[in-house]
Image (cartoon, grey):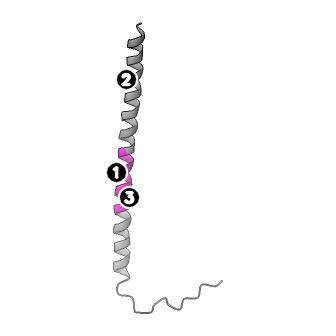
Amino acid sequence: MDTSLVSALLGAQAGNARVDMAAKFMRMNADSGQAIAQLVDAAAQNAKSLANVATGTGANLDITA
């Protein structure tokens, strides 16, 4: 085999590996973005449930054991 052909094949394989890694990172970013959106939504739901709590509730909480 000609060395230039071998070199081209090795370069193509390395390029494919880079594309595969880039696709994997893009999927990870999309997944983390979705997880952050779910976390913000859960925090908003929790805040709504605490909206009707009387003023001062929990202000004098003693947590000593």
Q: Is residue 26 above or below residue 56?
A: above
Residue 64 on image: x %, y %: 64, 85
Residue 27 on image: x %, y %: 36, 46
Mark 1 and mark 2: Cα distance apart in space = 27 Å
Q: Residues within 10 Å of mark 2 (few under 14, many from 20)?
A: few
Q: Quadrant of the C terminus?
A: bottom right
- Single out the mark in the foreground, 1 or 2: 2
Q: Residues within 10 Å of mark 1 (few under 14, many from 20)?
A: few
Point 39% across, 44% down: residue: 25
Point 39% across, 12% down: residue: 4
- Tag 3: amino acid: Ala
Badge 2 marks a residue whose secondary structure is helix
- Which image quadrant for residue 51? bottom left
Q: In front here: 21 or 56?
A: 21
Q: Residue 35: which disc?
A: 3
Point 34% across, 62% down: residue: 37
Q: Residue 12: which disc?
A: 2
